[in-house]
Image (cartoon, grey):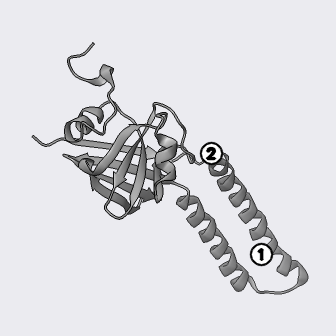
Amino acid sequence: MDSFYEDIVKRDNGTLGKMFPVTSVIGAVILTIVVNVFPMLIGYNIIFFTGMFTLLIWFLVWYLNRKLKVEYEISMVNDQITATSITAMTKREELCSFTVRDCEFIGPTSSDRFDSDKANCEFTLNCTENREIVKGEDDWYLLVNAGNYRYMLVFRFNADVYPLLRRFNPRATVIKPELVRGRQ
């Protein structure tokens, strides 16, 4: 029987994500007015060049605002986990792919091991809503040993993925009695 799990998380950009689009559009409007009106007031007829410059400015504003929209997709098919970054809702980039059996530890970021595991990793992939990793029961991490290097994948925990993690790597997964079938 094949098992499948998929979760898409949209990155919250915080204050920067809310302020940058507004300020960039206001700045582009002001720059458009200055670049196009000021030469005409002085008496220069260079509307073609200023028009091209204006188009370049608006394209840059559009491009940067789209780049701020980042989503992460965590998919699990049987024991294979794939983490993907989706930028501007079009560009997909695979961040990592590994099996659950390669994990040394699977547990919440509030565990005692988290800080020491993070210090002993080459890099950490944060696939949660927050820019910074928040310690708690809502975010879990997978400590992956990929031969020559170790890395950590932090993801938003969902109760649907717990039985799959326990099935394919029961020793490394932290026990949550309320999520194990048959227990009350």
Percent across and percent down for residue 133 are 54, 44
Q: Residue beneath label 2, please?
A: 14
Horizontal side of 120 relative to 101 (left or right) equals: right
Of the pair 17 and 78, the residue shown nearer to us:
78
Percent across and percent down for residue 22 are 69, 53
Horizontal side of 120 relative to 63 (left or right) equals: left
Q: Is residue 72 visible?
A: yes
Of the pair 9 and 184, the residue shown nearer to us:
184
Q: Residue beneath label 1, please?
A: 36
> Measuring 36% from the left and 33% from the top, which residue is drawn there?
158
Percent across and percent down for residue 42 are 90, 82
Residue 166 vertical placement versus 75 (above, below): above
Horizontal side of 113 relative to 18 (left or right) equals: left
The quarter of the rendered structure image containing the C terminus is: top left
> Measuring 56% from the left and 48% from the top, which residue is drawn there?
131
Q: Amino acid at mark 1?
A: Asn
Q: How far apart in space, not on screen, are marks 2 and 1 (Cα)? A: 34 Å
The quarter of the rendered structure image containing the N terminus is: top left
Q: Residue furthest right?
A: 42
Label 2 or label 1, whichever lies nearer to me, is: 2
Would you call the spot at circle 2 few (<14 residues within 10 Å), some (14-19), or many (20 or more)?
Answer: few
